[in-house]
Amino acid sequence: MIKLGVNTVLFQGFDLRTAMQHIKWAGYDAAEISAIKGMCEHLELDSWKNQAGDIKALVQDLELPITAMEEAALDEDRLIKAFEAGAEIGIPVVNVGPGGSQGNPEDLGKCLGMLAKMAEKAKPFGVSLCVKAHVGAAIWNTTTTLVAMKQIDSPAFGIDMDPSHIHRGGEVPKDALREVVSRVKHVHIRDCAGSGPSPGPPELQACGRGDIDLMGYCKVLVDAGYSGPVNLEVIGAGSYELNRCAIIAAESYGYLNACLKACGGRQG
């Protein structure tokens, strides 16, 4: 059964316990913890050892595992700390963006070199490093994702497939997913109304409100036998009241759960 979770960045204006409690109440199986410097640090990597015990106790108390961490930046020092924290807390996936600029071969080469290096460093910790195609960055579409898949063969490397960025890059997400699903280890998911360049306000990132064929996307995942994390990632809600964040989470759960049940990816 595919596990559904929420990246705590949706609740960036609130503490981790509040975020995870509302994720649990919305019906989700899991959470992704945000460690995004400058945006949302529910996990502060510079002092992760001080938080580890409390986070593990929170996971046990709520019966809500943390299936991934979003560190975001391709920064060696922060990634080593992320791998250490992941190994200690029990977080199997660390997600990053590619950085660099779109259409720049030099940036793409640097990005691939750093990803390969850090995937090897992730391996001893028993965690996987995943990268997603990101509009405007060095890896931004299916073509550049396939280059990364070809050049990085480490078992500790995977693709984080985010349909919103693929949609805004001018591709059809479900079709793009078929080409890369063999290496997908994590899915960031949200909807998107229009073609961007931004994903739109948080409420229009709620699954089912936008233009992406998320039912078709879920079917590709299920047909491929994908069993990794699927975590809702909604950004931009830092000034939202708690009930607005909770509504976005709950609405998205209902939609994604129904899609995955219809495809045979969840029971019930």
Image: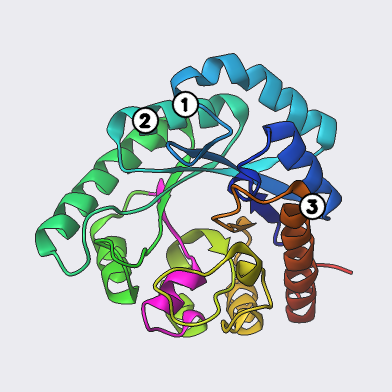
The residue at 36%/77% (across/down) is: 169
Q: Is residue 214 above or below residue 268?
A: below
The kind of residue on which mark 1 rests is Leu
**Does residue 167 show up magenta in the picture?**
yes
In this figure, which residue is indicated by the disc labeled 1? Answer: 45
The location of residue 259, given as percent across then percent down, is 74, 77
Instruction: Give the CA separation, mark 2 to mark 1.
Output: 7 Å
- Label ID, residue 67: none
In this figure, which residue is indicated by the disc labeled 3? Answer: 243
Q: Is residue 139 above or below residue 117?
A: below
Q: Nearer the viewer, residue 139 or 184?
A: 139
Label whose residue precedes the other's in the sequence (3 or 1) = 1
Q: Nearer the viewer, residue 13 or 94?
A: 13
| 219 sits left or right of 188 in the view | right
Marks 2 and 3 in Cβ contact (< 8 Å): no
Quarter-wise, where is residue 37 in the image?
Answer: top left
Task: Tell me the element at label 2.
Answer: helix
| 144 sits left or right of 248 in the view | left
The kind of residue on which mark 2 rests is Arg
Q: Quadrant of the C terminus?
A: bottom right
Crowding near pointer 2: few (<14 within 10 Å), some, many (20+)? Answer: some
Q: Is residue 36 visible?
A: yes
Residues in magenta, as a range: 155-173
Task: Tell me the element at label 1.
Answer: helix
- Label ID, residue 78: 2
Q: Is residue 64 visible?
A: no
Quarter-wise, where is residue 260 in the image?
Answer: bottom right
The residue at 69%/77% (across/down) is: 208
Quarter-wise, where is residue 190 in the image?
Answer: bottom right
Q: Nearer the viewer, residue 237 or 222?
A: 237
Q: Quadrant of the N terminus?
A: bottom right
